Image (cartoon, grey):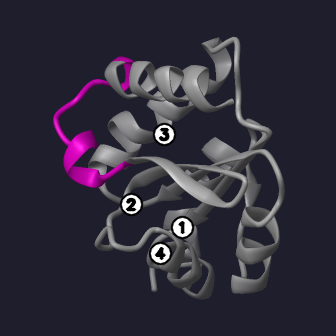
Amino acid sequence: MYPAELVMPMKAELTDNGFEELLTSDKVDEILKKEGTTLVMINSVCGCSAGTARPGVLLAVAHSEKKPDRLTTSFAGFDLAAIQQIRSHLLPYPPSSPAIALFKDGQLVHFIERHMIEGRPAQMIAANLADAFEQYC
């Protein structure tokens, strides 16, 4: 597990902007079975998370006309039970962090894996998400 001193500022970047933390497996299931759309940002200490994933998600949410009903986040390597449960909903995709998932009525409809984040600017990630929001939200 990562030390809290390292993780908390990275969590706050999302929670200070309206993202709800998913901290337990029960909370993951409760949120994902709700009707409507749920964005799940799998947060990470990875440089691409700080450099492009979190900023890209925040840009998409701030500038898209259509938005998910719920904005959520969980931290890989820290919120262990929640991440394990989220990943069970992402199968057959392998574990990936950072990663960004959009669920509609409990079903995964859009997924951005780490390899789709690395080396791409935040604006490109935001555009990808904005297109998904337009289609599913």
Element at label 2:
loop
The amino acid marked with disc number 1 is Phe
Question: In this rendering, which labeled residue sits more in front, label 3 or label 4?
Answer: 4
Crowd class of label 4 (few under 14; some 14 to 19; many from 20; radius 10 Å): some
- Residue 68, horizontal then vertical, whole percent: 71, 35
Question: In this rendering, which labeled residue sits more in front, label 2 or label 4?
Answer: 4
Tell me the CA gap for discs 3 and 1.
12 Å
Residue 45, labelled with which disc? 2
Q: Using the rendered view, name the quadrant where residue 11 is placed.
A: bottom right
- According to the picture, the residue beneath numbered tag 3 turns out to be 54
Tell me the CA gap for discs 4 and 1.
12 Å
Q: Are marks 4 and 1 in contact (CB under 8 Å)?
A: no
Element at label 3:
helix
Question: In this rendering, which labeled residue sits more in front, label 3 or label 2?
Answer: 3
The amino acid marked with disc number 4 is Arg
- Residue 69, horizontal then vertical, whole percent: 80, 39
The amino acid marked with disc number 2 is Val
The first of marks 2 and 4 along the sequence is 2
What quarter of the picture does the C terminus occupy? Answer: top right
- According to the picture, the residue beneath numbered tag 1 turns out to be 75
- Please give the range of residues in magenta: 112-123
Tell me the CA gap for discs 1 and 2.
9 Å
Residue 87, labelled with which disc? 4
Point 77% across, 66% down: residue: 33
Q: Are marks 3 and 4 in contact (CB under 8 Å)?
A: no
Tell me the CA gap for discs 2 and 4.
18 Å
The amino acid marked with disc number 3 is Arg
